């Protein structure tokens, strides 16, 4: 019995030891990863902080940047020739105060931000435009006289400078190219003379075109920007200046626009060196290639910038560029869009010769273009060289494009001041629910070609468009009298 008891005892002890081992081993085995309890990485935490308002402490941001934000008071002896209120947008700086005497002094206020300890201040061109005396009020209460270092009307950026024996507080410049829609930002300025007002919102859109479609690249934000905010900084959650507030919508509240700080930073060397910005210029009007234009013109790719028009005696004209040329590269650097080409050429010194690669009628070519200097801003959008619309006259019959055309006569040519080489048909009516209306065709424009085939008469236009079928896409080459420019439009025929 004792031997059997001993055997049972050994078995029980072994079993107990085995069970204890399993329990211990189980307690030491790593548990499966659970994303809900995993500590976030620094990158994830940074992204979360940019998405969660509670984690963005703009009180700290305002405390850091406020000392570098200034109030600008600009005074001129006489009246300004014109207000800087363009299209449906206006600058967020109050109109110059005046009385009944047009020769009395004019005053305007705005904001600015100190970007260098020696007193260089970034602001808007329209804040200091034509000013004969500029006073800058600092956050510490001091008021100093400022001098204009340089100004660039095309980007609405100006650089002014104040002096002091001691260094000035500086706002750090960020990277506006890294902005994302929905990112939290704040604006600091002097709206309606309420100094150092802080407002908070998000980036609503990036790359908005307002006044000059070739250079504009505005940041749109719903952070409240009002009259007097012009020139003040738009700041990200890290306390970096990412934009210079420049414009507001006059048709809605809380829609403001800022010049990207990278665009401002790019012109600073020229503003310091020569007081203005000289940009390269080819002299062509461009259009991005979408799928409709690619299909209608038989292009091999949508990448590149398509030439719509070439200015007479411009560098592009002298180099032999033509409408329908697809520019694909400059000095070996690929061109993927209009904006890319414009930025590349504008950033190149006038007088420089560049190699332009293009595709013409399915053949690759290279031409050498010596750049000229880009002309200053011309008439603002909405300002027409021509008065009124052409009178209603008998037109061609119905069209699947949703428009009616008629032959040009001498009166049309004189009234619209058409160049001698313009041959085509005049758009007399556009159906507001037709495909032509959707393609931005307007009464008074001249149709020159349909799918690269010249249009000599209304009868010819009817022949070229009479056999189109639903779903077809037509490329119309136009002359726009109000802009004195040729342009391409694509019209997609509606499905029944």
Image (spheres, rainbow, N blue to C red):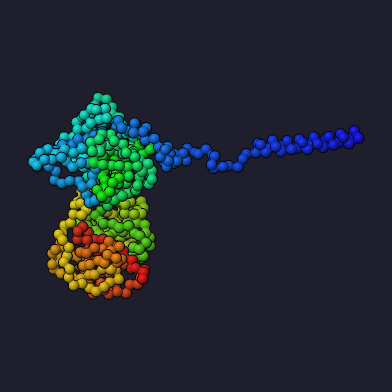
Nearer-the-camera pick, 67 or 275: 67
The residue under the point 31% across, 64% down is 490
Q: In this orientation, does residue 157 appear? A: no
Nearer-the-camera pick, 360 or 454: 454
Name the image quarter holding the N terminus: top right
Residue with the most extreme right position: 1
Nearer-the-camera pick, 289 or 141: 141
Nearer-the-camera pick, 296 or 88: 88
Residue with the most extreme front position: 253
Placement of 351 over or under 194, stated as above or below: below
Q: Quadrant of residue 405?
A: bottom left
Name the image quarter holding the C terminus: bottom left
Task: Return the x and y of residue 415 as percentages of the image width and height.
Answer: 14, 63
Placement of 477 over or under 59, stated as above or below: below
The residue under the point 30% across, 30% down is 67
Residue with the most extreme top position: 165
Q: In this orientation, does residue 248 appear? A: yes
Q: Quadrant of residue 118?
A: top left
The residue under the point 22% across, 53% down is 381
Task: Return the x and y of residue 196 as percentages of the image width and height.
Answer: 28, 34
Task: Return the x and y of residue 476 as percentages of the image width and height.
Answer: 28, 65
């Amino acid at each position: 019995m004792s031997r059997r008891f001993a055997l049972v005892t050994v078995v029980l002890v072994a079993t107990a030891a085995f069970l204890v081992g399993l329990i211990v081993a189980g307690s030491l085995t790593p548990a499966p990863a659970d994303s809900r309890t995993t500590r976030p990485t620094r990158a994830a935490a940074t992204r979360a902080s940019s998405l969660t308002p509670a984690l963005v402490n703009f009180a700290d941001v305002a405390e850091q940047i406020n000392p570098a934000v200034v109030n600008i008071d600009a005074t001129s002896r006489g009246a300004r020739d014109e207000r800087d209120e363009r299209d449906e947008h206006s600058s967020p700086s109050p109109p110059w105060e005046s009385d009944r005497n047009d020769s009395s002094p004019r005053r305007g206020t705005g904001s600015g931000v100190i970007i260098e300890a020696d007193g260089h201040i970034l602001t808007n061109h329209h804040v200091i435009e034509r000013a004969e005396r500029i006073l800058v009020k600092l956050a510490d209460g001091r008021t100093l006289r400022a001098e204009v270092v340089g100004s660039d009307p095309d980007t609405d950026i100006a650089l002014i400078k104040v002096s002091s024996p001691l260094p000035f507080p500086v706002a750090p410049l960020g990277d506006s190219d890294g902005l994302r829609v929905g990112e939290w930002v704040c604006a600091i300025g002097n709206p309606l003379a309420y100094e150092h007002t802080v407002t908070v919102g998000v980036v609503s859109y990036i790359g908005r075109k307002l006044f000059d479609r070739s250079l504009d690249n505005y940041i749109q934000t719903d952070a409240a920007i009002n009259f007097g905010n012009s020139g003040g900084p738009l700041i990200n959650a890290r306390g970096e200046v990412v934009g210079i507030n420049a414009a507001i919508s006059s048709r809605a509240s809380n829609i403001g626009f800022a010049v990207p700080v990278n665009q401002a930073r790019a012109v600073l060397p020229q503003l310091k060196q020569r007081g203005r910005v000289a940009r390269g210029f080819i002299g062509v009007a461009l259009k991005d290639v979408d799928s409709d234009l690619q299909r209608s013109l038989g292009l091999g790719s949508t990448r590149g910038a398509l030439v719509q028009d070439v200015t007479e005696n411009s560098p592009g004209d002298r180099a032999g560029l033509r409408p329908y040329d697809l520019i694909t590269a400059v000095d070996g650097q690929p061109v993927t869009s209009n904006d890319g080409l414009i930025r590349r050429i504008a950033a190149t010194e006038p007088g420089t010769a560049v190699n332009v690669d293009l595709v013409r009628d399915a053949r690759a070519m290279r031409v050498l273009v010596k750049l000229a200097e880009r002309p200053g801003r011309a008439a603002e959008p909405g300002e027409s060289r021509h008065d009124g619309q052409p009178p209603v006259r008998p037109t061609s019959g119905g069209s699947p494009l949703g428009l009616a055309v008629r032959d040009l006569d001498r009166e049309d040519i004189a009234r619209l001041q058409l160049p001698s080489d313009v041959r085509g048909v005049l758009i007399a009516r556009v159906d507001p629910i037709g495909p032509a209306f959707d393609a931005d065709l307007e009464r008074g424009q001249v149709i020159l070609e349909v799918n690269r085939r010249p249009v000599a008469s209304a009868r010819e236009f009817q022949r070229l468009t009479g056999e189109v079928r639903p779903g077809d896409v037509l490329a119309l080459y136009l002359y726009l009298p109000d802009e004195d420019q040729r342009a391409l439009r694509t019209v997609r025929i509606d499905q029944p």
